[in-house]
Every structure is written in structure tokens, then in C-alpha cells.
């Protein structure tokens, strides 16, 4: 499956060039201003963003902060400003990489490849994602539909297990032992069911979708 790249760039010639070069390897989405860029980011949920700084309506620095507050996906900044202080500020604000204009298209392609490769290496970013749910097992942050989700410790651990293998059906006894680290008894069902119900409700409230389903006579899984 091709990675999704969102290009937020107000120069139509540059945008067209990037689309022509990158569309053979990636699914490309485009926006010409900061407001459209943020909206497109929320709708598309891309794997990487190429972000120009000099944007109409909302500048690139503000777009960078909005995206970084909602996601840890790689962001490569394009800028005509050749300033060490500016570069440091961009990296501190959450940019993963940057190129100054005019840039070499082959170098940009290489940097995109590196960022996407790093994003998918196990253990690098501590992220588990499924559809529009993302869990960071290092910071214990969860987002659903790009909104922060407040979970209890047990709810977080349940979701972490389900996200790690989203197509696997877990028996209730298996889930209980993995989360509570205790022997499973029939009375344990009530405790587990309450936590699963709370987690299901929070996910549904945030996304409008019922992600956690019970497979009758077998167990629990994500869909």
C-alpha cells in the first residue's frame, strides 16, 4: 500500500512539480494555503507532510504546530529563509527535516524515503496506529480522530494489545491475564467487561465508529 503524502505549498509550479515526481511512488494530496492544509491533514491523515513556510491565511509555522499537536508523523519543511536560528526554531517546533529553496528534487526524494522508513521501524517512535486511532506507548498518549483520548491505565493497556494485532481475536481470559497479570475466574468477566465497555464508549464517542466488537463464543477484536 502506497504511503500518503500531503503537500502544503502555495506555489502552483512547485506543487505541480512535486506531484509529477512523487505520484509514481506515493498517494499525493495537495493544499494551497494553511487553512486548507490543516483541513486536508485532518481528512487525509497522511503518512508525511511537505510543508512550505510562506503560506497565505495561516503561515507554515502555525500549521506545523497544529499538526504536531495532533500527530507525530514526519514533517519536511521547505523554506526560502537561510537562517541557522530559523532552522533551529523549526526543529524545536517539531519539524523532522527541512530543505531550503531552491532544492534538489532527488535530495527531497531521498529525505522522504528516510523519514518514512524511520516511521515504520519498530521501536523507533513507540507508535501503534489503526485507522484513525494512534497510541504512543512511550508518552502514554492516545488520539482518536486526531483528538486526545483520556484512558485509565487498564483501558490503555487493553487498547495497546488490540492495536498491536488488530485482526486477532483475543479470548477474554487471555486479555484479562495480559492486562491484570492475574489468574482468570468467571468473576473476572465483570471487571473485564466494564473496562472494555468504557474503552468502546470512549472510542465511539470520539470517532463515531464501533471499533471493538465481541465475536460470540470466541472473544474480542478490532474491526
Image (cartoon, rainbow, N blue to C red):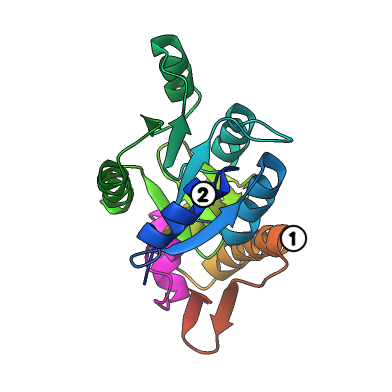
Q: Answer yes or no: is residue 147 visible.
A: no
Q: Is residue 192 magenta?
A: no
Give percent across and percent down for residue 135. 48, 50
Give percent across and percent down for residue 64. 56, 34
Span highlighted in magenta in the image = 162-184
Is residue 180 positioned above or below 96 on the image? below
User: Quick one: quadrant of the N terminus?
Assistant: bottom left
**Distance from label 2 to label 1 (Cα)?**
42 Å
Q: Which residue is mark 1?
A: 205
Q: In this orientation, which residue lies closer to the viewer: 69 or 188? A: 69
Q: In this orientation, which residue lies closer to the viewer: 74 or 26? A: 26
**Residue extending farthest front:** 13
Residue at image location 31% in from the left, 45% down from the top:
105
Is residue 22 positioned above or below 222 on the image? above
Tell me the SS state at disc 1. Answer: helix
Q: Which residue is mark 2?
A: 13
Q: Is residue 164 magenta?
A: yes
Amino acid at each position: 500500500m502506497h504511503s500518503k503524502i500531503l503537500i502544503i505549498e502555495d506555489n502552483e509550479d512547485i506543487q505541480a512539480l512535486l506531484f509529477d515526481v512523487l505520484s509514481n511512488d506515493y498517494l499525493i494530496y495537495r493544499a494551497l494555503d494553511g487553512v486548507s492544509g490543516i483541513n486536508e491533514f485532518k481528512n487525509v491523515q497522511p503518512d508525511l507532510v511537505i510543508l512550505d513556510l510562506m503560506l497565505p491565511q495561516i503561515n507554515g509555522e502555525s500549521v506545523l504546530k497544529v499538526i504536531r499537536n495532533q500527530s507525530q508523523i514526519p514533517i519536511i519543511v521547505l523554506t526560502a529563509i537561510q537562517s541557522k536560528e530559523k532552522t533551529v526554531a523549526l526543529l524545536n517546533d517539531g519539524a523532522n527535516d527541512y530543505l531550503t529553496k531552491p532544492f534538489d528534487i532527488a535530495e527531497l526524494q531521498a529525505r522522504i524515503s528516510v523519514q518514512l522508513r524511520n516511521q515504520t521501524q519498530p521501536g523507533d517512535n513507540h507508535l501503534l496506529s489503526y485507522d484513525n486511532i494512534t497510541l504512543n506507548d512511550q508518552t502514554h498518549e492516545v488520539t482518536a480522530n486526531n483528538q486526545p483520548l483520556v484512558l485509565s491505565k487498564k483501558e490503555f493497556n487493553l487498547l495497546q494489545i488490540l492495536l498491536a494485532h488488530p485482526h486477532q481475536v483475543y479470548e477474554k481470559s487471555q486479555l484479562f491475564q495480559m492486562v491484570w497479570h492475574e489468574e482468570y475466574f468467571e468473576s473476572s468477566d465483570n471487571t473485564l467487561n466494564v473496562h472494555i465497555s468504557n474503552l468502546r464508549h470512549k472510542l465511539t464517542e470520539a470517532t463515531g465508529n464501533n471499533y471493538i466488537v465481541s465475536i460470540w463464543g470466541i472473544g474480542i477484536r478490532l474491526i
